[in-house]
Image (cartoon, helix red, strand yellow):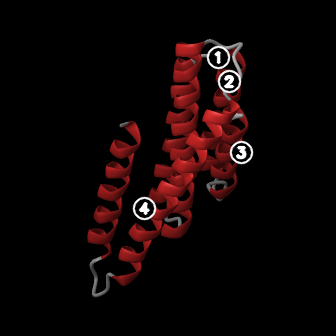
Amino acid sequence: MSSAIVLLAALGVLVITAFSLYTLIASTIGVVLLAVSLVRKSPNIFSLGMGALFGSILLAGLLGMAPVFLLTASVLAVVAWNVGRNGFSIATEIGHGVSTLRIEIIHAISSIVVLAAGSSVGYAVYLVMTGGQPVLALLALLIGIIALLIALQK
């Protein structure tokens, strides 16, 4: 179950960030590495794939992609990372042969709800900020994402 969510979220990042050849290449590398890591059950390859996905989002931001698309791609990437890491953690503790569908679904849904709520608040702050201060709004958004990542680790 978690592998399907990870791949769907990663494909969402690929679609969103595919507005430039460079971001398309980085996203494609990330999705391929994630697929390989899920087949081979390798957390190290998974980390490389997530690094490529996050790199494609950063590159898209540097190339001028609209903030709403960057935020959506970031949320999808964090969902993929969180659900994938949780799947690897469960497999390490319980083993690969045991059915963990129920716990993975609950974790995935709760992660998506928390990230959607946090990103909505962050985007609302970004929209409310006026008068040449969008850098502060993006900083607030970054702090919010970091706080969500810390909260999801507990």
Q: Where does the image place residue 36, in percent across and percent down from the top left?
A: 69, 22
Badge 2: how crowded within 10 Å, few (<14), some, or many (20+)?
many
Residue type at the position of mark 1: Lys
Label disc, if present, on residue 141 of the rendered structure: none
Badge 1: how crowded within 10 Å, few (<14), some, or many (20+)?
some
Residue position for label 2: 38
Residue position for label 4: 118
What's the distance in space between the residues labelled 4 and 1, CA to CA?
30 Å
- Circle 1 SS class: loop
Residue position for label 1: 41
The reply to whether callout 3 and callout 1 are in contact (CB within 8 Å) is: no
What's the distance in space between the residues labelled 4 and 3, CA to CA?
21 Å
| Sooner in the amino-acid sequence: mark 4 or mark 1 | 1
| Sooner in the amino-acid sequence: mark 4 or mark 3 | 3
Residue position for label 3: 8
| Sooner in the amino-acid sequence: mark 2 or mark 3 | 3
Residue 149: tell me if it is visible: yes
| Sooner in the amino-acid sequence: mark 2 or mark 4 | 2
User: Image check: 128 left or right of 31?
Assistant: left
